[in-house]
Image (cartoon, rainbow, N blue to C red):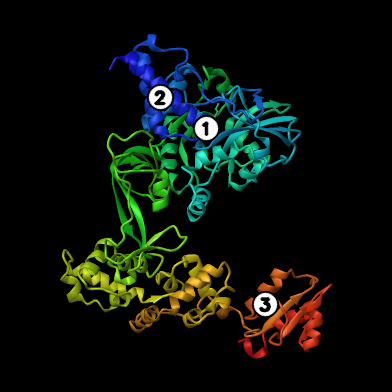
Amino acid sequence: MDPALRAADLRALLHQHAHRYYVLDDPQIPDAEYDRLFQELQALEDAHPALRTADSPTQRVLGRVLDGFVPVRHQVPMLSIRTETDTTAAGAEAFDARVRRELELPTDAPALAYACELKFDGLAIGLRYEQGVLVQAATRGDGETGEDVTQNIRTIGQIPLRLQGKAPPVLEVRGEVYMRRDHFEHLNERQREKGEKTYINPRNTAAGAVRQLDPAITAERPLSFFAYGLGDVQGWARPATHSATLDALADFGLPVCADRAVVEGAAGLVDFHRRMGDKRDALPFDIDGVVYKVDRIELQQRLGFVTREPRWAVAHKYPAQEQLTLLRGIEVQVGRTGKITPVAKLEPVFVGGTTVSNATLHNLFELRRKGVRVGDQVIVRRAGDVIPEVVGRVPGARPVYVPNFRMPTVCPVCGSQVLREKGGIDHRCTGGLFCAAQRKQALLHFAGRRAMDIEGLGDKLVDQLVDGGLIRTLPELYTLGLAKLAALDRMADKSAANLLAALDKSRQTTLARFLYSLGIRQVGEATAKDLARHFGALDRVMDASLDQLQQVVDVGPVVAQSIRHFFEQPHNREVVEQLRAAGVHWDEHEGSDIANTPQPLAGQTLVLTGTLPTLTRDQAKALIESAGGKVAGSVSKKTQHVVAGAEAGSKLDRARELGVNVLDEAGLLALLQPAPDDTH
Ligand code: IVH
């Protein structure tokens, strides 16, 4: 293609995408794709300097002030940093070499000290503090002029409205507003439950939230902040190094990321890049690279700037967490609870550090809303330990007609009917444990590390056991014999013996693990632990009423209902009995509230009224419950005691009417003392 035509095409494309990205906060292509187009244009312009037009996106910093916000002129321009896209060690070495050359250091000069930080993936913000008070917050805009977003920024709890300690007359803090990955997932989970549009990634969601005209909307989005530098400063002798500056900012009460280090020379940079790369998935937020800054401010000043980028800093990237690829097909997967998830079959693509060929499309509604069809170019995101997902498609006409995806009406695994609950979002296979897919998932869950922890019982073996008809129910696991196992394809005698040993070992467990392993809907690890702690014995959980279940911390009506429903099914009770008969056991009461605290109020109902002299209502309730008692909202004949404090109202009258015992706080505390025969 004619380079002039290609350059014009690239300019138009980049302008279009930059507008969507910077102005509308609604990008259509992943950053990595934008970078590729940008670099292609840069290369073309380098090869043919005549093609470098004044309006080329390579020639100016992008971004525009939105109509609704008041423009803010930055006292000190908000610069960007040069990006090193070579994600290998060479990227760090090139930066160190460049800095040393520009400082005209002799080759044998000692290694330079660098401040290394994470490159947060959010939105740059300048926070202006005058006499320690936050007076203005502004976005970067085009670097010279940004937008006044003070109202919105004030809704971010992490940002101090007043600095701690002896604050200078003027201190402008620069940093990044971002959204944690768990907050983002939670937000999307809620959107999904409501059947509403999900957000694409934490970065755009954070940026969108900051630029809301209505601060009430910003306040609903969980945003966070990290400080990473300074803008305008007056009346403060700033520290001599960047790292000490960040320490000072932390002392002023600003959030500064702990994952930073001062390192020496290129080797130190390479090491930091590698260490943070290893840690990337485990961080609670997205980063797209690390940032190296020459630590000594005096050296920074000597290095100065090229166009709008400091020579003393560089962003060293990691592999992108979003990529474009071809959607080859859509299949469905049947989960443990029968939920049918559409799964994208992709042209394999390297994203977030691994090659991805499957990604979730969550549910039919989301798939429809994103409008993806087989043959589309789609955006795949893989960040942290979140499963890869398709977040959207690249808009554009399809060359041929492609029919829309339809949910199967019968389960592709067991042929049972597929249904969607009225008003619900998810489609489910109604086959239950008749469905081999659900059985397999149930087995895998049961055997999981956090459940019964049966080492060696993985995907492949479960497939063989279920497909070969060796196992139909969970308890049958414990009836497997060496002969049956060793007859399986590719199963050596030794592995069969190992599996049997692992199964045997798993028989000794805890109530919490056992409850979790049953795979009751809504009962995750934490809830299983709470249930075990509260009830102490399996039979008490199985027979608990909805009310009793809701006495457990964090168990609401939905979770309680799900637990009741599970144990009301005769076949589930049978599974439990068979597992016990197979020798699965645990110490009842181990680690439970019941074992640890005597239960002087067991079976008694108390009512609280008025204000107690030292205990809050919640504290009193917790004390009563931990002593085995129950707190009710109204007085009846079934009430044993009414605990009355100052300004007790009608409940006290009612207690007198019914002749119910009335106590004050001291009386309650006395009641909580275990009876003499309770203490061993
Ligand atoms: S320093 C003069 N440090 O990356 C240097 N920037 O182009 C000013 N960013 O949008 C930037 N983490 O908001 C710096 N630790 C960090 C950063 C960081 C993220 C963002 C910044 C800007 C872009 C730089």
Residue 348 at x, y percent in the picture: 28, 42
Residue 95 at x, y percent in the picture: 43, 25
If you read the primary sequence from the N terminus, does the residue marked by circle 2 or circle 3 appear first? 2
Tell me how far mark 2 sits from mark 3, CA to CA.
Answer: 66 Å
Mark 1 = which residue? 24
Question: How dense is the environment of label 3, judged by Cα within 10 Å: few (below 14), some, or many (20 and up)?
Answer: some
Three-letter code, disc 2: Leu
Mark 3 = which residue? 631
Q: Is residue 561 visible?
A: yes
Tell me how far mark 1 sits from mark 3, CA to CA.
Answer: 53 Å
**Element under label 1?**
loop
The answer to whether residue 308 is left or right of residue 661 is: left
Quadrant including the N terminus: top left
Q: Are marks 1 and 2 in contact (CB under 8 Å)?
A: no
**Element under label 3?**
strand
Three-letter code, disc 3: Val
Residue 43 at x, y percent in the picture: 35, 18
If you read the primary sequence from the N terminus, does the residue marked by circle 1 or circle 2 appear first? 2
If you read the primary sequence from the N terminus, does the residue marked by circle 1 or circle 3 appear first? 1
Q: Are marks 2 and 3 in contact (CB under 8 Å)?
A: no
Q: Farthest residue toward the bottom?
A: 677
Mark 2 = which residue? 13
Looking at the image, which residue is at 34% across and 15% down? Answer: 5
Tell me how far mark 1 sits from mark 2, CA to CA.
Answer: 15 Å
Q: Are marks 1 and 3 in contact (CB under 8 Å)?
A: no
Instruction: Point out which mark residue 558 bears.
Output: none
Residue 56 at x, y percent in the picture: 45, 17
Three-letter code, disc 1: Leu
Question: How dense is the environment of label 1, judged by Cα within 10 Å: few (below 14), some, or many (20 and up)?
Answer: some
